[in-house]
Amino acid sequence: MKIQDIEIKHISISLKKPFKTALRRVDSAENTVVIIHADDGQTGFGEAPPTAVITGDTNESVVAAIKLMRKSLIGMDIDCLDNIMYHIDGSCLNNTSAKAAVDMAVYDLAAKSCGKPLYKYLGGYRNCVETDLTISLNEPDEMCKDSMEAVSQGFRALKLKVGLDPEKDIERVSAVREAVGKQIKLRLDANQGWRPKEAVRVIRTLEDKGLDIELVEQPVNAADIGGMQFVTNQVSTPIMADESIFSPADALRILQIRAADILNIKLMKCGGIHNALKINAIAETYGVECMLGSMIESKISLTAATHLASAKKNITRVDLDAAILLSEDPVLGGLRKEIPRFYPGDASGLGIFGIRDLKDVK
């Protein structure tokens, strides 16, 4: 099976309600879709959301990078997977979202060439994962309302966005814990919003109040690895690195100084499944668990993430709720949702056989 052509499309899906964090507000998913055609008629699918404030990628830069990759990938044999991945990674610096889109489409074809679902091709540890639901950063009463609605839908873990105002963040978390009770897992994501000593003060206050926070994600600036190490050493609540990790080398650097207790892998940050597998293997070697997270993605890339999380034992948590935040689902096939569980399914590859409402990219 050889790569015959790489097609680039655009997909636009509005969100049910605005998604708000300490870094940005998103009202719709405006993503680039990759379709790789093989010479035997098989098709592989991938996707890249533009997340300029985190990855630096825009739709324009994603499209340009994919066009650059296409030149060297046409004609390559899918069976030579490692060779393809080195061509993708070496095609340009950074551009991790573009690389992830092409990477997952290649893995889709690789698994299809073997007649296996991707999660079994990658390891097949489990056939189901359970996602949390992200609660956007708003006033405490609105976050309580959204949290209660999520619990009523069946979610057993919530990720609360915080990081704009330390005192108000304490108020937000306290209110949500009181509203949902003790049985619901609460995860916090500050999106780099606190300074190190500020983070320690907030987290210790939450600990003293007995709010039982499962973890705090990226409390400080992504570049401040020493600051994150300081927070990790000063609090009892597990600290999870997110924006600080793009590459396997980043993961190794954080683990060597124990700057975090958990790693959040996102395909759009690390450049796809190939590097995600490396990060997870490094973390497992250090006895550190991983979460698999997402940006504002459609079911295309979330299906790839579900397959990866299902494949590996060391990926113990997932934050793949983006598809639930979208107002519609134009993807035919792919993961199956039974809130809060996602099933990768047993169709070959990603199990995606079509996408509605795609637009041409110039």
Image (tube, rainbow, N blue to C red):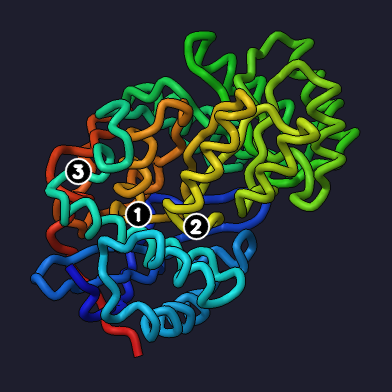
Question: Residue at the location (52% across, 37% down)?
Answer: 281
Instruction: Return the residue at label 3.
Output: 117
Provide residue 260's location: percent of width, then percent of height. 72, 32
Mark sitting earlier along the chain (3/2): 3
Instruction: Return the residue at label 2.
Output: 268
Measure how far apart labels 1 and 2 are at the Cα level: 9 Å
Residue 193 vertical placement versus 260 (above, below): below
The mark tally for this picture is 3
Provide residue 132's location: percent of width, then percent of height. 44, 31
Question: Residue at the location (81% across, 19% down)?
Answer: 204
**Seen in the image, is 49 located left or right of residue 343?**
right
- Secondary element under disc 1, as helix, strand or loop, is helix
Query: Alpha-carbon neighbours of circle 1 within 10 Å: few (<14), some, or many (≥20)?
Result: many
The type of residue carrying mark 1 is Ser
Residue 18 vertical placement versus 310 (above, below): below
The type of residue carrying mark 2 is Met
Quadrant of the rendering where the C terminus is positioned: bottom left
